[in-house]
Image: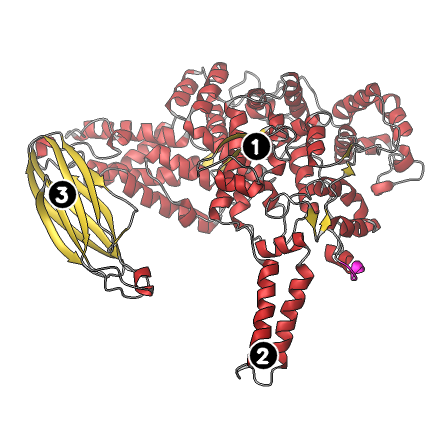
């Protein structure tokens, strides 16, 4: 047996000190199994052995390491003998039928129906698994959700399908979110080009809004067309009231000048009144016409559903309904539709448009309701390519319609477009993969891959919801925490001791209290506000960094360590970087050996891995292990003591987080996990919870030195990034591959996916980490291209 001849000699030599000969560290003893068969059957054990061996976590850095030959021999044995992986016919794994998540549903409705359905308002949030919200196992359908999908189908069909073949042309000439004060003159001008001579109707909508209390300000509004006055009216304070005016116009073809002038009728009011000045907003100027039927045009979305006017003959009309519904249902189901289904849909349409007061378009809209509520639309149903003999070994390819859907939902988070449908219908998609992937990445819809993958992998989606107390964070950096708390406690005690809290204070008491409050303000005055704009810039910095790697086919190692980042003036000032002005984000070259560069030192990551009042080396270390190195620690044991308990051991002084963690790590219950996490988290301690660079914590110099669990020493985060990008780059390649493959497949990875991941990592390493290599390797991988043979056993 190869266990005894190949694996056991390496295990005895390097592992038995901790996991054999009576030792069972971590409750693992290789010689504690009743038989070799029982040992081989524990796949989870061998998967962990392989992961720890590759990450150089075992044997520990203090023990002799296996030679390269021993390591490769043991890796190969684990994959083929212990895990039963056949490199010539790897198992593509199981596929749970996947419901469209909220993002995919909204995008698919947009591309199929031409309608923007507000999923955030109408559908509940999706559950997540393995860090992503597109995992088939967690995208369940409850009775409530099914009811919401039925309601959504009715709303979407009613709003998206045009009900008449022709309508009067309508164009919004002017609409603005800008508000104009009644105390400042304003003049707005737009030019409308009338393509045809005829009768027109012009609608002007204005909104007058006052803020809070009444304000006496008034203003005159004059509306003209070609300097011909149509409206002259005075307006005063209103609580968001809409005024609508309509005018009938007969125009010759040519340009028309539309102007609106606002003139204040009172001088500026003083004090608080001026703050409440009413404002006027142009909701819209809409031009309809020409009104003569000869000039009517197709309504919005007509060409999406229809190709011509419906015929009068009943048989021809039924054939046209079959044509329309066949095209729409095929696109909705993302594959050809069987004839019985189409006949049922046509019968629904016919039952509606045959009624005296209904039109052909009403029937089509009603037939689209069951299409949008069908499991074939809501779920991504997949078939496999037919094989001559299903009993033969090997796993079949998914058919090209399923491949088109996997591609489009992976790269665009939406349904396949016409070109993907056509290639799948012709059976040419698989042979055109490289060209299609390049085309799809160049399409603006590929922004969905960046936003949805990065937003969940690096948690940038969470930046807006993280609560950070800027006062407490900066007070901790300055060492003023306890002084501020002492002063606040004094104020509370004085209030509690007062005989009657309602009685006025003496002048001396008032002066003393104000003195204490001023001291608190001085000690805790925020020098920065983590506002909406700053959070948005942080999120955008991370998304643009990933997009730069994708669009320019750069090495994915630049995500770890780079000599550039993306900033605007506000974020640059937050980072202490000069020379950046304006609100626009742009690529900024960093000086040599700068502390920034790479996602680990970006504000988005630093904020989401912090606590409200301080940094969290544990959260940050865990983040790096899980999302960069791919070697997360085991789950924490029950009843693990809180970190604050270790702080109480230094009641006489304010210890730094490094000192607190050292006390915490000294407890046997906490040691094994924290030895992995803490060095990585402490390397980031020069960045506070706001993502700002600092030299001190609690008035003491920050010590960011340490040694990784794999033995590499470092002095700060710059050296950690270099270690990850050089000697540990295979760990990052593997971690990023596993994350992207999980996102692409919509399922968690299992032991049988190890071979696919290894092949992708090998290609990535040979091509210097180019993103295109990673992407194509994922798309060409066995799990992406195939489905498990029904007769195969995992």
> Which residue does the numbered mark 1 point to in the structure image?
95
Q: Of the residues under marks 2 and 1, which one precedes in the sequence?
A: 1
Q: Are marks 3 and 1 in contact (CB under 8 Å)?
A: no
- On screen, 758 above or below 225? above
In front here: 205 or 744?
Answer: 205
- On screen, 399 above or below 129? above
* Range of magenta residues: 649-653
Display colour scheme:
secondary structure
| 3 vs 2, front mark | 2
> Which residue does the numbered mark 2 point to in the structure image?
508
Indicate which disc residue 407 carries: none
Query: Left or right: 28 with respect to 54?
Result: right
Q: Of the residues under marks 3 and 2, which one precedes in the sequence?
A: 3
Q: Are marks 3 and 2 in contact (CB under 8 Å)?
A: no
Measure how far apart labels 3 and 2 are at the Cα level.
70 Å
Query: Left or right: 161 with respect to 196?
Result: right
Total numbered labels? 3
Can residue 15 be seen in this snapshot?
A: yes
Rendered residue at 63%/81% (across/down): 497
Within-10-Å neighbours for mark 3: few <14, some 14–19, many 20+:
some
Q: Position of residue 736 (x, y in %)?
A: 62, 30
User: SS of the residue at dot 2?
Assistant: helix
Indicate which disc residue 202 carries: 3
Q: Position of residue 312 (x, y in %)?
A: 14, 30
Q: Position of residue 157 (x, y in %)?
A: 31, 41
């Amino acid at each position: 047996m190869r266990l005894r001849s190949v694996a056991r000699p390496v295990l005895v030599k390097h592992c038995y000190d901790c996991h054999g000969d009576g030792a069972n560290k971590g409750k693992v003893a290789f010689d504690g199994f009743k038989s070799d068969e029982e040992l081989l059957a524990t796949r989870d054990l061998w998967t962990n052995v392989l992961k720890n061996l590759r990450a150089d976590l075992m044997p520990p850095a203090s023990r002799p390491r296996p030679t390269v030959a021993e390591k490769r021999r043991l890796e190969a044995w684990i994959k083929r003998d212990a895990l039963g992986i056949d490199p010539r016919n790897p198992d593509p794994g199981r596929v749970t039928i996947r419901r469209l998540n909220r993002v995919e549903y909204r995008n698919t409705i947009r591309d199929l129906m031409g309608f923007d359905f507000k999923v955030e308002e109408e559908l509940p949030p999706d559950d997540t698994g393995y860090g992503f919200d597109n995992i088939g196992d967690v995208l369940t359908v409850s009775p409530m959700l099914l009811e919401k999908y039925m309601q959504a189908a009715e709303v979407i069909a009613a709003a998206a399908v045009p009900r008449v073949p022709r309508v009067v042309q309508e164009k919004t000439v002017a609409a603005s979110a800008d508000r104009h004060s009644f105390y400042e003159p304003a003049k707005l001008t737009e030019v409308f080009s009338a393509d045809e001579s005829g009768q027109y109707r012009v609608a002007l909508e204005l909104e007058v809004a006052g803020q809070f209390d009444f304000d006496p300000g008034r203003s005159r509004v004059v509306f003209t067309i070609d300097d011909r006055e149509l409206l002259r009216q005075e307006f005063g304070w209103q609580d968001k009231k809409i005024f609508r005016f309509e005018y009938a116009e007969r125009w010759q073809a040519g340009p028309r000048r539309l102007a609106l002038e606002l003139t204040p009728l009172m001088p500026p009011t003083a004090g608080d009144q001026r703050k409440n000045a009413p404002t006027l907003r142009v909701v819209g100027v809409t031009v309809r016409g020409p009104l003569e039927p000869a000039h009517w045009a197709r309504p919005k979305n007509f060409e999406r559903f229809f190709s011509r006017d419906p015929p009068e003959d009943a048989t021809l009309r039924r054939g046209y309904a079959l044509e329309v519904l066949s095209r729409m249902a095929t696109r909705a189901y993302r594959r050809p539709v069987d004839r019985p289904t189409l006949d049922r849909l046509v019968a629904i349409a016919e039952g509606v448009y045959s009624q005296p007061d209904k039109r052909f378009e009403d029937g089509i809209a009603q037939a689209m309701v069951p299409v949008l509520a069908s499991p074939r639309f809501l779920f991504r149903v997949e078939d496999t390519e037919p094989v001559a003999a299903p009993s033969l070994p090997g796993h079949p390819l998914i058919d090209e319609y399923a491949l088109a859907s996997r591609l489009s939902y992976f790269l665009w988070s939406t349904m396949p477009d016409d070109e993907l449908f056509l290639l799948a219908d012709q059976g040419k998609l698989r042979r055109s993969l490289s060209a299609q992937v390049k085309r799809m990445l160049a399409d603006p819809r590929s922004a969905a891959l960046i936003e949805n993958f990065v937003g969940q992998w690096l948690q940038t989606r969470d930046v807006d919801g993280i609560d950070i107390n800027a006062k407490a964070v900066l007070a901790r950096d300055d060492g003023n925490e306890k002084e501020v708390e002492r002063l606040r406690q004094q104020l509370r005690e004085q209030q509690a001791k007062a005989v009657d809290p309602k009685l006025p204070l003496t002048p001396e008491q008032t002066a003393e209290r104000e003195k204490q409050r001023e001291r608190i303000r001085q000690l805790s005055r925020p020098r920065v506000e983590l506002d909406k704009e700053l959070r948005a810039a942080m999120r955008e910095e991370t998304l643009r960094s990933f997009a730069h790697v994708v669009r320019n086919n750069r090495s994915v190692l630049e995500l770890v360590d780079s000599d550039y980042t993306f900033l605007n003036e506000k974020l640059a000032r937050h980072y202490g970087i000069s020379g950046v002005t304006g609100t626009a984000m742009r690529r900024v070259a960093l000086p040599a050996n700068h502390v920034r560069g790479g996602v680990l030192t970006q504000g988005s990551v630093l904020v989401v891995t912090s606590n409200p009042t301080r940094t969290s080396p544990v959260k940050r270390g865990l983040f790096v292990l899980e999302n960069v190195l791919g070697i997360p620690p085991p789950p924490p044991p029950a009843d693990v003591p809180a970190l604050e308990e270790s702080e109480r051991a230094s009641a006489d002084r304010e210890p730094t987080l490094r000192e607190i963690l050292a006390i915490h790590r000294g407890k046997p219950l906490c040691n094994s996990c924290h030895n992995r996490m803490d060095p990585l988290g402490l390397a980031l301690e020069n960045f506070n919870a706001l993502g700002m660079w600092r030299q001190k914590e609690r008035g003491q110099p920050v010590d960011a030195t340490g040694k990784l669990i794999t033995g590499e020493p470092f002095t700060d985060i710059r050296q950690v990034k270099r270690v990850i990008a050089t000697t540990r780059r295979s760990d990052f390649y593997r971690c990023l591959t596993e994350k992207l493959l999980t996102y692409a497949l919509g399922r968690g990875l299992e032991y049988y996916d190890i071979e696919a991941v290894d092949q992708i990592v090998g290609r990535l390493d040979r091509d210097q980490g180019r993103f295109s290599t990673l992407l194509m390797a994922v798309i060409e991988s066995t799990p992406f291209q195939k489905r498990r043979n029904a007769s195969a056993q995992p």
